Image (cartoon, rainbow, N blue to C red):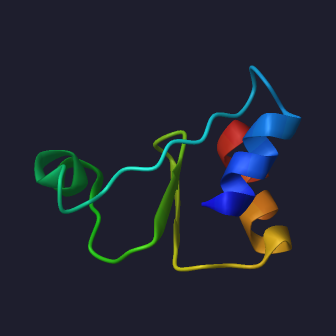
Amino acid sequence: MRLAQEIARANPGRVTADMVDAESFMRFSERVGVFSVPLTLINGVEQVVGAVPEPQLMQKIRSAMQ
């Protein structure tokens, strides 16, 4: 989450980052398909499961923005 927040701060208006407690918001978690945490959901298109290195996250962000 920290990396996603840093990317959002560096790209205001283009990238946003929010953190949701999957246990507190179970309906939302079920709707977006959270089966494991952490899960990064990018524009509702790309998902990254687990903590990943910055290059891998950036690749998914670029893919979601196209």
Is residue 64 something that shows in the picture? yes
Q: Residue 41 vs residue 29: left or right?
A: right
Residue at 87%, 38% (x, y): give it.
10
What is the residue that sits farthest to the left in this orientation?
27
Which quarter of the rendering shows the N terminus?
A: bottom right
Which quarter of the rendering shows the C terminus?
A: top right
Q: Residue 14 vs residue 50: left or right?
A: right
In the foreground, 17 or 62: 17
In the foreground, 6 or 13: 6
In the foreground, 53 or 25: 25
Point out residue 44 in the picture as x, y percentages from the top left corner: 46, 42
Residue at 33%, 77% (x, y): give it.
36
Point out residue 61 in the picture as x, y percentages from the top left corner: 72, 51
Question: Dividing the picture into quarters, in which one does residue 59 lie?
Answer: bottom right
Point out residue 60 in the picture as x, y percentages from the top left corner: 70, 59
Is residue 60 something that shows in the picture? no
Point out residue 29 in the picture as x, y percentages from the top left corner: 23, 55
